[in-house]
Amino acid sequence: MTPAPNATAECGICGRHLPVRRLADCAAVRPGLAAALEAEHPDWQRSGFVCLDELARARRRSIEQMLLRERGELTDLDRAVVNSLAQGGTVSHDVEADFVEDRSLGDRVADRVARFGGSWAFIIAFCAVLAVWMAFNLLAVTAEQFDPYPFILLNLVLSSVAALQAPIIMMSQRRQEEKDRARSENDYRINLKAELEIRHLHEKLDHLLMRQWERLTEIQQVQLELMEDIANAREQQ
Ligand SMILES: [Zn+2]
């Protein structure tokens, strides 16, 4: 019989009286979770109702123990996934957006300079400046030459550019590495959560199928009994 929507019942574990929609029927709790609940509360009778809070806690503990068995220890990432499973939240972040938002002015300049320094536009512009500089100092009248052959000032400018460019590129690369790491952590979290959810779904499906099967055999039994009753009644007529 289905209880009325506003009916309350007692949780078999914590003893609170709660609306039925916040409780689960013990028969519907899959065996793995039921075993976890029983291990935690040895005096629990597997009958009546269990509140969803207790179920969520048991589920979280069983996932934690499973991960501990498989890996020996839990990392912060594993914990984040377990928490999100318990709370029903999502674990994925938009890594790209997070990084774009967090950029300081220095980071933005470093990114721009690194991007420009690694482009054909930079190489062509640089060659053009070199060619103009050398051509002017070779071909102009001696009095106008500001850096005559062998272009000592040009050497100084070039080594300054190289000295500045290297750390700027390294800055940008370090940020890129951080972004890659955040992205792979994000992927790991999503994959682990998907794996756990799929495993959980499998268990639920198996449990549902088993219960369905038990119900079917029960119904068949009842039908057989009914048919026997009808046959007996006919014989007696
Ligand atoms: Zn409870």
Image (cartoon, helix red, strand yellow):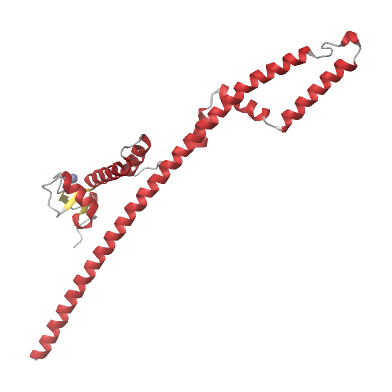
Quadrant containing the N terminus is: bottom left
Q: Where residue 190 sits: x, y (%)?
A: 42, 44
Instruction: Write the residue at 36% across / 34% down.
Output: 76
Give the left or right position of residue 181, taking residue 10 as reference.
Answer: right
Which quadrant holds residue 218?
Answer: bottom left
Say which of 163 and 78 sits in front. 163
Give the left or right position of residue 211, taking residue 187 as reference.
Answer: left
Q: Is residue 17 visible?
A: no
Q: Can residue 40 be seen in this view?
A: yes
Give the left or right position of residue 95, taking residue 48 as reference.
Answer: right
Q: Where residue 90 sits: x, y (%)?
A: 39, 43
Given the current orientation, which residue lies at the most extreme left position? 236
Instruction: Write the residue at 50% across / 31% down.
Output: 178
Q: Quadrant of ligand 1?
A: top left
Given the current orientation, which residue lies at the most extreme right position? 141
Quadrant containing the C terminus is: bottom left
Q: Where residue 204 sits: x, y (%)?
A: 29, 56
Instruction: Write the residue at 23% across / 57% down.
Output: 28
Q: Where residue 21 sits: x, y (%)?
A: 24, 51
